[in-house]
Image (cartoon, rainbow, N blue to C red):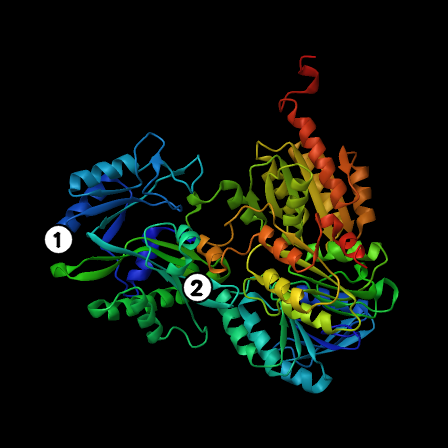
Amino acid sequence: MAILVQPHTKVLIQGITGSFGARHAQLSLDYGTRVVGGVTPGKGGQVFRHNRHEVPIFDTVAEAVRETGATASTIFVPAAFAADAILEAADAGIKVVVCITEGIPVTDMLRVKRALAAGRTRLIGPNCPGIVTPGEGPESRGGCRMGIAPGYIHRKGHVGVVSRSGTLTYEAVWQLTCRGVGQSTCVGIGGDPVPGMSHLDVIKLFAEDPDTHAIILIGEIGGSAEEEAAAWIRQHCRKPVAAFIAGATAPPGRRMGHAGAIISGGKGTAAAKMEALREAGVAIAPTPAEIADTLIRLL
Amino acid sequence: MNIHEYQAKQLLAARGLPVPPGEVCETAEQARAVAERLLGEGAQQLAVKAQIHAGGRGKGTFVDGYRGGVRLVRTAAEAEACARAMLGNVLVTRQTGPAGRRVRKVLVTAAPDIRRELYAAVLLDRARGCPVVMVSSEGGVDIEEVAARTPEKILTEPVDAVLGWQPFQGRKLAVALGLTGPLLTPAAQLFQGLYRTWWECEASLLEVNPLCVVAGPGGADALLVVDVKMTLEDNALFRHPDLAVLRDVHEESPLEVEASRYHLNYIKLDGNIACLVNGAGLAMATMDIVKHYGGEPANFLDVGGGATVEQVTAAFRIIMQDANVRAILVNIFGGIMDCDVIARGIVAAVRETGLSLPLVVRLEGNNVVAGRQTLAAAGLSVISADSMGDAAQKAVAAARAREERPRDVPASAMPS
């Protein structure tokens, strides 16, 4: 088992006919992911072809779910239409929605978050690299790849990785793979101010997953999600956790107004996050080049 | 995107919030005319306020020694003189850095006597995932100081994004601030108006500091928005063309403006090691590791996930305009992005710019072998690195070696 998605999970791609969506649909098919349908309003009935694959395209997510039995969907639609796409997926009963789209306005995401609060749909992202549950094949093929992460850097195994950043996640995963340590599932939750699943939501799943034996948490300055994860880990998590927090040297206040720092009660700095994690028994990687080694020392 | 005080006040006034009458001026003569009009309409006192995107204007000093970016006056002649002293002058405040900002506009506005100074803001609470209205009885000072010294004097009211602001929430905050009696309804309406402005304009921050109780008509208490800071959310500007035009590029660093033209995310810093990285998280982590090994990053630069040869060339041009740079560190993890594209971008940039600084390159990921071959075949004197740690240490060493001799002087010309 892994978390959120398994190698056999049936996946849709919303925005499969756009250049970005199409490219990553191809890469997911090459990786061996079960991409069973695409959704592009107005192109229902057409077929997305790649090598020997033929993926039917639907006008709506509801139809796609009915025809294919998909339970997960990756969203590549432009920012102006992305909130609608997320709500459509949730309405159609999709369990795991991964939204890759960057630049969705905050007011849109505030409404989406409220709408999803009551339902059973889990949202990963937006503005995230997505999820990979590595497979058994060469270069981890045969796994489930939702999003834009490179498949080949993974290796099937027992470390769960959760991160806000894209390329920094790849860096950590590659470090693990190069040292012969595989991953159960890698989740990029994205760097937006109003995200779907938080670090803590994902860590809770890793803690319950018998296939995950250790966890890597990669955070960034801003917000207080890492502190919340630390508080929970301290109380409940029995698995070894290693962490890296990016942005210790970033200039303060460049992204948000000063008042933003106040609302989180002085939290949000790299130092505060590392301290909270250290107190929870998490091993902190001193540099981003030592993320895998820091975890491996705990095993 | 930050906007000016006078622009924010126009947005608030258009939604019925109590903003003092005033007008923005680009010449001293205009300032005199506006002052005459306001005094004729019954204003007893006026403020002349320099319009720059930085706080601390009142306590700031101009480079020629003139004191105060906000001045109170009682005659049109004084208003004209203040405007003349400020316009074209460079104002230094604790937020501008020593270089200061050139003042191109002043706001001339009525300035009634202030009886109480309060604070109000609307912003996103990331932890709760909802908007909040934040108020304090301590206005006119830095809210950071209030938060540090007397956090109990800051009150927050979370807002349900779907329900929107409810009138009772405004009454709650009004009572908590002691705005009762005849001020209760206007205060509740004011908080509602602030929230509505924040939501409709899709601001990331709307801050009124101070929000004042002033002497209104007939001497009765009245509420007044005396100073405003407003930041609009860049991601939402596409559906607000009327707000997008409020951008003032004079207030942005020229290098950052150029970077945004190429969709590069660039922030200038004070160190001497320029960093060129793909992905924001990896870019931050690269700065961290440079610092860990004793170096100082000259910038944050994220070329994004799918950079082209043109973008990489533009990125090099931008980082080389920073005179402090002594070494360049390229750190690329090409997940999907082809490392050979980056390599070709580096070669083109080095040829185009005649780069003479030490260049450390760490390439990893997709098509990395071809990328390394491209760099090797070009015959550039690239210092290659095989991991992030290795790259950072080599860049720090190269910058240090470079720092020990003056820039732009060939080694052969140095006295031995």
Q: In x, y percent, where is residue A61?
A: 64, 80
Residue denoted by label 2: B202
Left or right: B80, with A192 as reference point = left
Query: Is residue A99 among what the camera can see?
Result: no
In this rendering, the answer to whether B134 lies above or below B288 is below
Which element is circle 2 on?
loop
**Mark 2: few, some, or many residues within 10 Å (few <14, many ≥20)?**
many
Q: Give neighbour class at mark 1: few <14, some 14-19, many 20+ (Cα, 10 Å).
A: few
Q: Quadrant of residue B209?
A: bottom left
Identify the disc placed on residue B42: 1
Q: Nearer the viewer, residue B346 or B17?
A: B17
Residue that sits furthest to the top in the current view: B416
Percent coordinates x, y for residue A107 in the rendering? 48, 68
Element type where label 1 sits in the image: loop
Say which of B181 and B330 sits in front. Answer: B181
As drawn, the residue found furthest toward the bottom would be: A66
Quarter of the rendering occupied by the C terminus of chain B: top right
Q: Is residue B30 left or right of residue B271?
A: left
Residue B164, position as x, y percentages in the image: 41, 74
Place of residue A232 in the rendered image (x, y in percent of width and height, measured from the top left) = 63, 67
At x 67%, y 15%, the residue is B413
Identity of the amino acid at label 2? Glu
Q: Residue A174's image quarter? A: bottom right
Along the line of sight, the residue nearer the viewer: B147 or A19 = B147
Task: Tell me the chain of label 2.
Answer: B
